[in-house]
Image (spheres, helix red, strand yellow):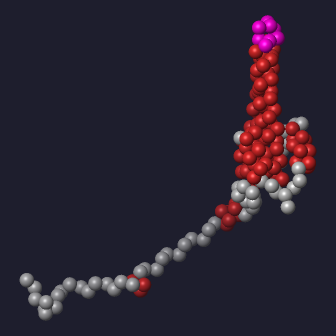
Amino acid sequence: MSDPTVPSSLPPEPASGPAATPPSPPQPAASSAAADATAVQPAAEGTGLQPHLAAALASFFLLIGGVVFLVIEKKDQYVRFYAMQSVFLGGLWIGLSIGLSIAYAILHGVPLVGTLLWLASLFIRIAIFVGWVVLVIKAFSGKEWEIPYLGKLARQQLARTPAAP
């Protein structure tokens, strides 16, 4: 056993406290490119998203996304324009799909008419799909683009609705 009166040969324990913690290393400065990317466009007030991202989401989800972003976003005309085009394109797609399906169901037995109606339906659906893809890409890139005929209708409809204060 050891004698408590005899000094031990163990080194003293280091003192704990604020003086014992090592200084933290300096943090690297944020790159100016990252700061510039966030300063390009302010976030939209209504959605909290960047305007180009909100417009792309409204366009991607067609009818539903357009309605949601029209309700949420009251001030940003860029987002509202793409949301309105999305509503019109989605409504056109649904209306034409229902109308062409009914017409095909009635006329598919007529030898040449059924085939022509099927080809017309295929062409129209591909055209709407291509228009949808272009709409989403243009919205995300931040460029304002009007769908032929529907863009003009969207602008007229937005001009009729009162702007938020």
Work out whether residue 150 or residue 52 is closer to the camera in this orientation and state it.
150
Residue 7 in the image, given as x and y percentages of width and height: 16, 91
Residue 125's place in the image compared with 153, above or below, is: above
Q: Main secondary structure of the magenta part?
A: helix
Residue 153 in the image, given as x and y percentages of width and height: 89, 40
Q: How many circles with numbers are drawn on the protein?
A: 0
Residue 51 in which image quadrant: bottom right
Residue 71's place in the image compared with 15, above or below, is: above
Identity of the residue drawn at 80% across and 34% down: 91
Asked whether residue 141 appears in the rendered view, the answer is no
Identity of the residue drawn at 53% across and 75% down: 26
Furthest-left residue in view? Answer: 1
Asked whether residue 152 appears in the rendered view, the answer is yes
Residue 103 in which image quadrant: top right
Identity of the residue drawn at 78% across and 41% down: 86
Identity of the residue drawn at 74% across and 47% down: 68
Work out whether residue 86 or residue 10 is closer to the camera in this orientation and state it.
86
Work out whether residue 17 or residue 65 is closer to the camera in this orientation and state it.
65
Residue 81 lies left or right of residue 45; in this view the side is right
Which segment did they paint magenta? 106-113
Q: Split into 4 quadrants, where in the image is the C terminus?
A: bottom right
Furthest-bottom residue in view? Answer: 5
Q: Does the magenta stretch include residue 110?
A: yes
Residue 99's place in the image compared with 28, above or below, is: above
Furthest-top residue in view? Answer: 111
Work out whether residue 35 or residue 126 is closer to the camera in this orientation and state it.
126
Residue 113 in the image, given as x and y percentages of width and height: 82, 11
Q: Split into 4 quadrants, where in the image is the N terminus?
A: bottom left
Q: Does the magenta stretch include residue 75?
A: no
Residue 66 lies left or right of residue 3; in this view the side is right
